[in-house]
Image (cartoon, rainbow, N blue to C red):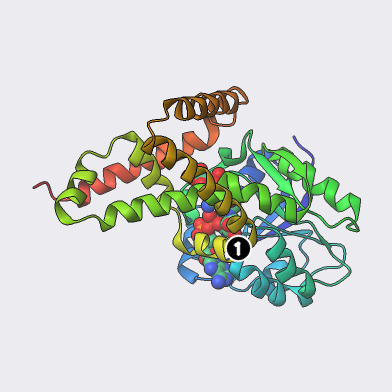
């Protein structure tokens, strides 16, 4: 039996990530009691039906009382308001963390509301799917995925050690870095890919009637892969782009320059430029696969949900 790291864990927000933390923490046996709270009563009821926690309470302030660790798993734009609500109720010595996809703005929004008696260890598990809500959670989500922690240099190292141990127990590999560095890296590896997916699916949707229906009919795996990403939660992604504006604009600027180079190569029939880039990008894909960053856990969960979604869509769509 694993050692309990946090006798009482409070989860504020119980969607895909909050639910997966609950399931993975239970699987690992590293928490005593899990207290769950979320904004909407129907989501809280659903979390209870799914047995994600031990206690379910209607306010974040109530949930965090006496918690050893509090993990906030709500859209990044809502983190500041949650911190303002829980700040006065936190136990002295507690650890507060989050899972937001953007770090610097979340730190700016949350830190001022947290008392000096608690340790703030912001986090971001780089693992997810395009699904949302408590039903989407699964215990293996973090297996062999990265979790980045961005504690300020003055944070109690003991608190950081506990959070590292917690995420490792959940299956993740952990690295610490500054919030600003995290935001720059994630702008290119996660945020820009989502922007491109939203844009290409939007462009296809704007095509005139005849072509548009053919795009849907003949959507082969290339376009289909983009539609998966473009199905990700709209509120979550609105908040990410609004909160990582500078880093995303920096990467978008570089992207646009490189796209102009490709545009010119196609116009000029410059096959060497195309071949050179495509050869280098294939090598990158192969090294990512070799590192084991593209497999197993998340795909397992995603495929389960994808199969369920396909079945649902088939049942709901009348054959014509
Ligand atoms: N989905 C992913 O792939 C992924 C991966 C890593 C990190 N994240 C980050 O995790 C966080 C949660 O994402 P998720 O995918 O679990 O989302 P989700 O939509 O599945 O769940 C969000 C939860 O937050 C609650 N919530 C929503 N708005 C709120 C508000 N204004 N105030 C309080 N609670 C509110 C919801 O009721 C729900 O319980 C986000 O910050 C996101 O950036 C997401
Ligand atoms: O796999 C997916 O569906 C994801 O988009 C997950 C993904 C990512 O971009 O890798 C999305 C946002 C999170 O902050 C972390 C992970």
Asked whether 152 or 113 is in front, the reply is 152
Q: How many marks?
A: 1
Residue 215 in picture, x, y percent from top left: 23, 45
Residue 48 in picture, x, y percent from top left: 52, 59
Q: Which residue is mark 1?
A: 245
Q: Residues within 10 Å of mark 1 (few under 14, many from 20)?
A: some
Is residue 51 visible from the viewing direction of this image?
no
Quadrant assignment, res 283: top right
Asked whether 287 or 113 is in front, the reply is 287
Q: Secondary structure at mark 1?
A: helix
Residue 265 in picture, x, y percent from top left: 43, 35
**Residue 238 in the figure: left or right of residue 228:** right
Residue, x 28% and y 55% (percent of image)? 205
Residue lying farthest to the left in this orientation: 320
Q: Is residue 283 above or below residue 198?
A: above
Residue 173 in picture, x, y percent from top left: 71, 36
Residue lying farthest to the front in this orientation: 268
**Residue 102 in the figure: left or right of residue 223:** right
Indicate the quadrant containing the N terminus: top left, top right, bottom left or bottom right. top right
Residue, x 74% and y 55% (percent of image)? 179
**Residue 32 in the figure: left or right of residue 27:** right
Residue, x 90% and y 50% (percent of image)? 158
């Amino acid at each position: 039996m694993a050692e309990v790291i946090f006798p009482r864990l409070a989860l504020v927000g119980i969607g895909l990530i909050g639910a997966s933390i609950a399931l993975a923490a239970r699987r690992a046996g590293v928490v005593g009691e899990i207290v769950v709270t979320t904004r909407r009563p129907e989501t809280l009821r659903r979390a209870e039906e799914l047995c994600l926690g031990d206690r379910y309470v209607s306010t974040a302030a109530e949930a965090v009382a006496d918690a050893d660790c509090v993990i906030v798993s709500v859209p990044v734009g809502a983190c500041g308001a949650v911190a303002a609500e829980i700040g006065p109720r936190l136990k002295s010595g507690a650890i507060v963390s989050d899972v937001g996809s953007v770090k610097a703005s979340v730190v700016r929004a949350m830190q001022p509301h947290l008392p000096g008696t608690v340790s703030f260890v912001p986090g971001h598990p780089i693992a997810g799917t395009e699904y949302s809500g408590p039903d989407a959670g699964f215990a293996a989500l973090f297996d062999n995925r990265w979790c980045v922690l961005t504690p300020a240099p003055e944070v109690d190292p003991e608190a950081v050690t506990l959070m590292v141990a917690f995420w490792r127990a959940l299956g993740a590999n952990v690295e610490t870095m500054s919030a600003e560095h995290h935001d720059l890296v994630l702008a290119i590896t996660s945020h820009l890919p989502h922007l491109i997916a939203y844009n290409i699916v939007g462009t296809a949707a704007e095509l005139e009637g005849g072509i548009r229906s053919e795009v849907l009919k003949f959507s082969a795996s290339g376009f289909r892969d983009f539609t998966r990403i473009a199905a990700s939660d709209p509120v979550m992604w609105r908040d990410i782009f609004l909160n990582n504006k500078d880093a995303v604009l920096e990467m978008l600027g570089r992207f646009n320059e490189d796209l102009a180079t490709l545009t010119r190569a196609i116009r000029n029939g410059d096959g060497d430029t195309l071949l050179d880039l495509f050869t280098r990008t294939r090598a990158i894909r192969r090294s990512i696969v070799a590192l084991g960053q593209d497999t197993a856990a998340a795909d397992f969960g995603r495929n389960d949900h994808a199969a369920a979604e396909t079945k649902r869509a088939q049942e709901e769509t009348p054959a014509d």
